[in-house]
Amino acid sequence: MKVLHVAAEVFPLVKTGGLADVVAALPVAQAQQGTDVRLLLPGLPAILEQVSGLRCVIDIGACFGALRVRLLRARLPGDGLVAYIVEAPYLYKRGGSPYQNAHGEEWPDNLQRFALLGWIAAHLAAGDADPEWAPDVVHAHDWHAAMSCAYIADHAATPAASVYTVHNLAYQGLFPMHDWAPLGLASRLMSPAGLEYHGQLSFMKAGLKFSDRVTTVSPTYAREISTLEFGCGLDGVIRSRSAHVRGILNGIDTAVWNPAADPAIAASYDAARPDGKAACRRALQTEAGLEIDDAALVVAIVSRLTSQKGLDLVLAALPELIGQGVQFAIQGTGDAALESAFRAAQAQAPGRVQVFTGYDEARAHRLIAGADAIAVPSRFEPCGLTQLYGLRYGTLPIVRRVGGLADTVVDASAAAVAEDRATGFVFDAASPQAFAQAVQRALEARRQPALWAQLRARAMVQQHSWEGPAREYLALYDEALAPLRADGLR
């Protein structure tokens, strides 16, 4: 089977969040299972600078506001997978993130930038971009790639199935309705039955409406997004596709995230030989300027600083928890008010709170390896990866019972502990009190060495590699292709 993954970022070339980790790891796992996998990426400077063997596949010319567009082919560093790269300097050659400028403002031409990505994906699927290769399945990731599904659906002769994965329904790719003309789609698709969403254009809706199959990154989130509370205004659309919506839990790259062979951390360790974790803990306290306090519960947070992540709950609970013997090491960037509030908390509690603004991959590894627990108190969480990294590193997750957090962490209730199933601490209400109580339960558990060792050992043997999810996606691709095969297109 030939599969094309379409995305705006991929680790380690460009990363703003967990999407990049998924796009880096899932195709590799599928390739290891015998799939012919390729990626389609925008020609961002960081991507063009780090791939190898660049060659032109087709010189497209002027389109989507750019005077010069070419489709290039290259190899990704490390795994060597083939990647197609859309070279359009007018649209992609700029600083900032893939989606925003250095001031956090959306690029005003994002409609053209990501419509072009989807348009080229559809042409690859139709077989008129690369004469040597065309995919059976186009797998589009989040709103940036969603237009792939609309362009494929608008060309009935395209002999490829489309699968669309929602990584976070809250980010939808909304644009003014009167900007639809550059898309080059039929006007019938601009109705409420198509891309129109409350007077705007929604790229997310393009993926939800026109893909052959819709997936989310955890089973619980797949159920949640069909409800008014979590549906972000698209719950009706999702319910209308309920027969074709599937939740497949994300995995993690167990080679990159492996405490037994992680070059970024102070000492190696694993479930059978956990002693190195103590050295990582001491190294983290030193690096973060935290008091060397063996009795403290060291809690890490590695996250975007947004209200979605529930970090205002952490701020409200900080004074009480610090007074009870908890230390916090936080890395993230995002909402300016939250950044400022965490810096103020650090100033008020030196030696107990340390905030690292921005994202540093190696430091993220050191935080997760060195902490006792990792907090993910999200209001909603499609899957979450940091709690999976925490499990792998014996850093017990403290999470709210939503989305993928509910699917991956077993609360340390008396029954779960007795049955040796517990892997962390789970709370329900999105309140500072509920979060504080979960942290206090973790603090009390750490004061019982035998219990803590049991919880840590159970956490570290959890299996969250990409092998299982990759097989699930391949089965889903077969399902999506069945109608095309029945019609003789495949």
Image (tube, rainbow, N blue to C red):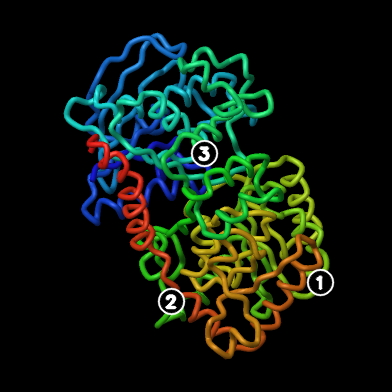
Residue receiving disc 1: 323
- State the residue in front, 424 or 369: 424
Q: CA distance from mark 3 to mark 2?
A: 36 Å
Q: Indicate left or right for 108 with 145 as reference.
A: right
- Place of residue 293 in the rendered image (x, y in percent of width and height, measured from the top left): 67, 76
Q: What amino acid type should be assigned to the residue bearing mark 1?
A: Gly
Q: Residue at x 25, y 19 (%)?
A: 58
Circle 1 Cα neighbour tier, 10 Å, few/some/many (<14 / 14–19 / ≥20): few
Q: Indicate left or right for 194 with 430 as reference.
A: left
- Residue 263 in view in this figure: yes
Outermost residue, left side: 132
Asked which quadrant contains residue 427, the reply is bottom right
Q: What amino acid type should be assigned to the residue bearing mark 3?
A: Leu
Q: What amino acid type should be assigned to the residue bearing mark 2?
A: Val
- Place of residue 56 in the rendered image (x, y in percent of width and height, measured from the top left): 24, 22
Q: Which mark is residue 461?
A: 2
Q: Residue at x 61, y 23 (%)?
A: 175
Q: Indicate left or right for 428 with 348 as reference.
A: left
From the image, which quarter does the C terminus lie in?
A: top left
Residue receiving disc 3: 208
Foreground mark, 2 or 1, reads: 2
